[in-house]
Amino acid sequence: MLHKFEFDGTKIVLDVHSGAVHEVDELAWLMLDEYKALARPEFLEKFCRRYDSDEVDMAVAEIEQLERSGLLFSPDPYEGKYNPPAGGITKALCLHLAHSCNLSCRYCFAGQGRFGGADELMPAGIGRSAIDFLIGRSGSRKNLNIDFFGGEPLLNFQVLKELVAYGRLRGREKGKEIQFTVTTNTLPLNSEISHYLNQEGISAVLSLDGRREVHDKMRPTPAGGGSYELVLKRIRSFVNSRDGLNYIIRGTFTGFNLDFCADVLHMADLGYKNLSVEPVVATGEADYAIREEDLPALFSQYEQLARELLLRRKEGRPVDFFHFNIDLEGGPCLPKRLTGCGAGYEYLAVAPNGDLYPCHQFVGRPGFLMGNVREGLVNSDIEAVFRNAHVYNMEDCADCWAKFYCSGGCHANAELFNGSIFQPYRLGCALMKKRLECALYLKVMESSQAG
């Protein structure tokens, strides 16, 4: 299986099953379409009529060598079938410290942070049980992850501190190391909290949607005012205090800012280099939803962003845009590429009362309650369903060129739009493919410049 695409005159071929990426000339580009379809004499005759025979012979020899090396026309290593290993190993939890929020973001999938319920903060006891649950289900894994989430998790800062201390202690006792991350709208960030997060080496995901008018339209305060200035002030102070510690600024674009490239560049021009701006996921009744007719404009924006980031890299002003990151050599192993994020078995979310769900986006959704950390039990039937939601079992994924990079897409989005985690969210698929093409183009250009 090959995927061919052209970006600003650069012809790129992805060998899907090996992951090899090739920049080719026009002759090879045309040959690859016919290489397997025509008998060799007919194939050579066709191309020798249009090109010099020596050029044709050299191109054929190169294609044959790449095929022998497993870098072109490589077979599916799993032959279209994959049986995930059994077992209950969990390596990451999303702890919902607060089902409460101090913003009223219009697109919030959690209903202003409450997930369909009342305001609620996670007690420290539930958090400790969650950490014990994670360590108990982690098997021989040494490195574990906990993301503090909400709502706004820093509204429960005292419990966050208690849980970090408890996690460090229990980790040392059990030979584990827990990496903590906090996802925050930044409004609670003050000098005390910033100092603590830095001191403890806690990674941070900071929410900012881009330009002032874009951010304020979708992320107002409960009183209806804009939050851009408040957020930006806290981001500036916090990032300046990080001294090399990990952070990413994450935004969301909607149907109201289809020109989202300007928002990425706005944040880059503010001096921030670790950025992620993601498409909103919303059903059609929302006025800010992204619709199929918006795709051409969004594709153009991703291409424009790729060009701009390439230019900035040449100028010595690199920007790390999360969705254009791709590791062609040392990326995830193949089973991981088949299964994606591991929601429902490797990764679970914990509500403030200790209830377990497949991931943070499933919290509160009927039918997806998996158990509770206090009992330490997980619904094995739901776990098995998610474990088997890999690309060979999902609708149309097995034949898709992007399958080893998107891993079937987001289960929560699939269930929201189609009522099944086995039927991918099509609009998300289209955007993912465009992002991947941009990422591959940037890799090819990076390699060309290095050469």
Image (tube, rainbow, N blue to C red):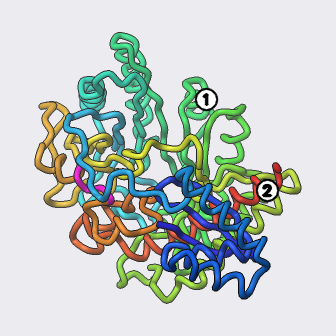
Question: Does the image show residue 211?
Answer: no
Quadrant in the rendering for residue 263? bottom right
In the rendered view, tell whether residue 329 sits above or below residue 421.
Answer: above
Q: How many marks?
A: 2
Residue appearing at x 12%, y 31% in the figure: 375
In the rendered view, tell whether residue 18 sits above or below residue 255.
Answer: above
Three-letter amino acid code of the residue under disc 2: Ser
Three-letter amino acid code of the residue under disc 1: Asn
Residue appearing at x 60%, y 47% in the figure: 248
Q: Please identify the residue farthest to the front as the structure is shown.
A: 41
Majority SS type along the magenta span: loop
Please tell me whether mark 1 sits on a helix, a strand or a loop. Answer: helix
Residue appearing at x 52%, y 75% in the figure: 254
From the top left corner, tell me how far across and down residue 132 is, in percent: 26, 24
Drawn side of residue 151 relative to residue 420, left or right? right
Q: Label 2, label 1: how many angstroms apart (C-alpha)?
A: 38 Å
Q: Is residue 389 magenta?
A: yes
Drawn side of residue 121 relative to residue 406, left or right? left
- Residue on which disc 2 sits: 448
Quadrant in the rendering for residue 168? top left
Identify which residue, 79 or 184, lies in the foreground: 79
Q: Please identify the residue farthest to the right as the structure is shown.
A: 315
Drawn side of residue 23 relative to residue 342, left or right? right
Crowding at dot 1, Cα within 10 Å, few <14 / some 14-19 / many 20+, comes out as some
Mark 2 vs mark 1: in front: 2
Q: Which residues are magenta?
A: 387-391
Identify which residue, 365 or 155, lies in the foreground: 365
- Residue on which disc 1 sits: 198
From the top left corner, tell me how far across and down residue 275 is, in percent: 64, 54
Please tell me whether mark 2 sits on a helix, a strand or a loop. Answer: helix
